[in-house]
Amino acid sequence: MKAICFKFQELIVLVKSLPLGLRFFSLTTALLLGLTALPTQAAVLLDQNFNSNDGGFTVNTPLPYDGPWVYSPGTGSWTEAGQGPETGHPNTSSLVSPGINVPQTGPVQLTFVHRYSFEQGNWDGGQVQISVNGGAFTAVPSAAFSANGYNGSVLASSASALAGQPAYVMDSPNYAASLLTSVCTLGSFQAGDSIRVAFMAANDTNTRGNFQPSWEVDSVLVTLSGAPTLNCPTNVVAECAGGLTPVTFAVTASDDSGSVPVVCVPPSGSSFPLGTTNVTCYAANAS
């Protein structure tokens, strides 16, 4: 993953008038070096829209019921249908991602497109969970969401496995006509960590929501942010010495672990011709 800093140079030619009636061009030329940071791009760890296959996701359903998670090739999505008639036990099903390797230290973000319609009255719900390095799945908390997080909690008196916990409950906005894009931070991880994401649909013993399916996940995107920060100097002005002009400049970069190397093309100390030259600098986290 690289952070890119774009630079531009502009040569300014000045014409001076001298005394004693003498007039000629004085090639007193200033070299302006402007340095501007461009936005960084996050590294993609998992990108699945399920249009061509199930994405390697698996399903964990502790006790059988009518509507556990299933992959639908026709819609290119995963769906969970809840439970209508009484079963006498909680009806729970988790859609689990394949293992996702974290190649370098930094925060990991989950973006998923979905819609939901759980039983009215907050008896059922859906929750996003995470497992790190093979550990138990734990809830992604409400505070981790930056867009379209949980809209309530499952009733504490419900037979649902999520009783009393924050979750997606009842109906997503405009369920019949649109999908919802939710964004959350899964945490900050170390290089070499392996994580899995789960979408846990936790119904009580009976009764579906207003619409079907109860929960539909249309796409899942997992990205690693925390790219290096490039520190660009203020504008540098160098006087043209005639022909090529050597120019030096300093660009540094750092990430969560400290300073990281910077490569600039052309490098500092290069000789620049009259005209405009682009200088591109980049820094990469240690892998």
Image (cartoon, grey):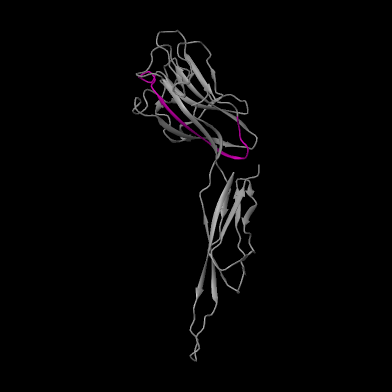
- Any magenta on residue 223? no
Q: Position of residue 156 (x, y in %)?
A: 42, 20
Q: Position of residue 267 (x, y in %)?
A: 63, 59
Looking at the image, the residue that sits furthest to the bottom is 20
What count of labels does the image hold?
0
Q: Residue at x 58, y 26 (%)?
A: 98
Q: Position of residue 73 (x, y in %)?
A: 48, 21
Quadrant of residue 135 within the rendered picture: top right
Quadrant of residue 256 within the rendered picture: top right
Evaluate whether residue 196 shows in this view. Answer: yes
Evaluate whether residue 165 shows in this view. Answer: no
Q: Residue at x 54, y 73 (%)?
A: 29
Residue 244, placed above or below residue 211: below
- Any magenta on residue 106? yes
Residue 267, placed above or below residue 283: below
- Relative depth, front residue between 90 and 263: 263
Left or right: 189 in relation to 211: right
Q: Position of residue 170 (x, y in %)?
A: 37, 22
- Relative depth, front residue between 77 and 85: 77
Q: Residue at x 61, y 72 (%)?
A: 243
Residue 172, placed above or below residue 33: above
Left or right: 201 in relation to 122: right
- Relative depth, front residue between 169 and 40: 40
Q: Quadrant of the N terminus?
A: top right
Q: Which residues are magenta?
A: 100-122
Q: Quadrant of the C terminus?
A: top right
